[in-house]
Image (cartoon, coloured by chain):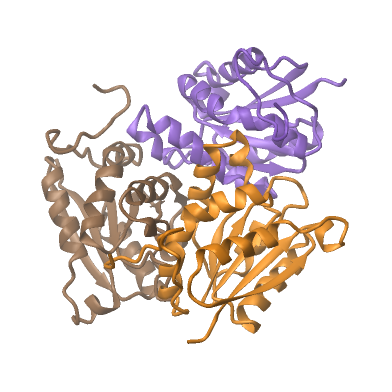
Chain colours: A orange, B brown, C purple
Amino acid sequence: MASAKIGILTVSDRASRGEYEDRGGPAIREYLGEVLSSEWEPVARIVTDDQPLIEAALAELAADEGCCLIVTTGGTGPASRDVTPEATEAVCQKLMPGFGELMRKVSLEKVATAILSRQTAGIIGSALIVNLPGQPRAISECLDAVFPAIPYCIDLLGGPYLETDEARLKAFRPGKK
Amino acid sequence: MASAKIGILTVSDRASRGEYEDRGGPAIREYLGEVLSSEWEPVARIVTDDQPLIEAALAELAADEGCCLIVTTGGTGPASRDVTPEATEAVCQKLMPGFGELMRKVSLEKVATAILSRQTAGIIGSALIVNLPGQPRAISECLDAVFPAIPYCIDLLGGPYLETDEARLKAFRPGKK
Amino acid sequence: MASAKIGILTVSDRASRGEYEDRGGPAIREYLGEVLSSEWEPVARIVTDDQPLIEAALAELAADEGCCLIVTTGGTGPASRDVTPEATEAVCQKLMPGFGELMRKVSLEKVATAILSRQTAGIIGSALIVNLPGQPRAISECLDAVFPAIPYCIDLLGGPYLETDEARLKAFRPGKK
């Protein structure tokens, strides 16, 4: 069975210029390493908070690299440089509003400023894109909430069969126990 | 008092070709029959998962048939053929994000994959369109959540006065006990 | 320190023609007076439910008056004259879906018809726009839910440092106790 490619896109002016260590990308990689039990391969990219560059990176990860899932970190706030959701919406054929709703809901149990996060999700070609916040602690919180639905979503998109370590996180597939 | 016309639109490639029995449409009809105590009349249609055909059916049910409410079933998932929300957004003058948010919230109490449902609602002319999932069990779950607000919404759109069997489901109208 | 200017925009056909006393605008002003402990100055406007006029008022409050926050009341329902969310989306560079989601959630604990409210929020230039319903009792309910995140949002937009009376409402700023 071919290994599933998963794109990890860090969106950060400072991390892309090397002024700041990228912590979001490695946090996603570590999370996926803990949760996935089937074979997978990370494809990491770092870009500045520039909408055309983010769009190009998302398109490249989906079309050229053939990723079935692309997870972004950073650029989801209200500041003028935060444009990751706009880039995601621009490249996606379909939007998945339930992801952002649920991630804000779980983050709101921790911090009142969770409503400032504009993160979304959508489908580009046959890949699912999910925006995550920039803070490493918020990354696992958000992924714990939405990841149970991701393997079945990838199934519906005709992608590889992702399996999780059920002791850590149970993927939900309708009709399966 | 004129009978209220309610459109029931099944969106399904297989059901429209007769390869598969339509179960969503009849489930909606049965639900409305149980809940509504005022006179109403169903206007049923079945179309394939084709965006222009779904748009045409929604427009015909609203403009030609004069339905005050149009309920769709099917085509709300992430797969490439699932385009009911896009067709709904394309024909509506106003979107009603609260419907999708609440339906995903109640479905999420049952299945983690509820976040994959992209169902929305909106206003076309003076009719309310509400997207429901395809599965019959999810249909009554979603309608139980949003139906209490529907009669008052129809009032605001200048439509017929819908009444419910209050032992089964209580419609909420502000300022009314 | 310069006083923070806050726009209060009442959207109502009847209030703008003087047929009806504006109660939403004064309710917002009273709420802000109770909650804010730093200096602020209200800039009040009343317009009809006309999309171009609402857009012009929002733009004027942001660009000409230099408001850091603009709160609207009215025009968020499903009726044909209700176009405040459309006007807000048209003038904003960014949308903030978390505000509408949370306000509908808290209103839903009180009334089933909360899902009919289409209120949203977004960023125009360096100002935050937040739509509120028209009913005075719903105004404080909604502001209690979202206001804790507003001072930090204004910080991120480079605006004035808003402080609240913590006995009444605690603003949340990440990294601050």
Q: Quadrant of residue B117?
A: bottom left
Q: Is there any visible trace of residue C47 in the rendered image? A: no
In screen coordinates, is A161 left or right of C58? left
Task: Estimate the x, y position of residue C126 in percent, counting from the top left.
Answer: 77, 40
Residue A59 position by quadrant:
bottom right
Q: Residue at x 20, y 52 (%)?
A: B5
Residue at 66% across, 51% down: A136
- The residue lying at 77 percent from left, 39 percent from top is C157
- Give the percent coordinates (x, y) of residue A90: 63, 66
Of residue B97 and residue C80, the one placed in the foreground of this image is: B97
Q: Quadrant of the C terminus of chain B?
A: top left
Residue C18 in the figure: left or right of residue A176: right
Could you tell me residue A4's position as x and y percent? 54, 78
Q: Nearer the viewer, residue B23 or B157?
A: B23
Say if A44 sits above or below A14 in the image. below
Residue B176 shown left or right of residue A104 in the figure: left
The quarter of the picture where the N terminus of chain B appears is top left
Residue B176 is at least partly visible in this image: yes
Q: What residue do we see at 29% from left, 29% from top?
A: B173
> Which of B7/C18 is in front?
B7
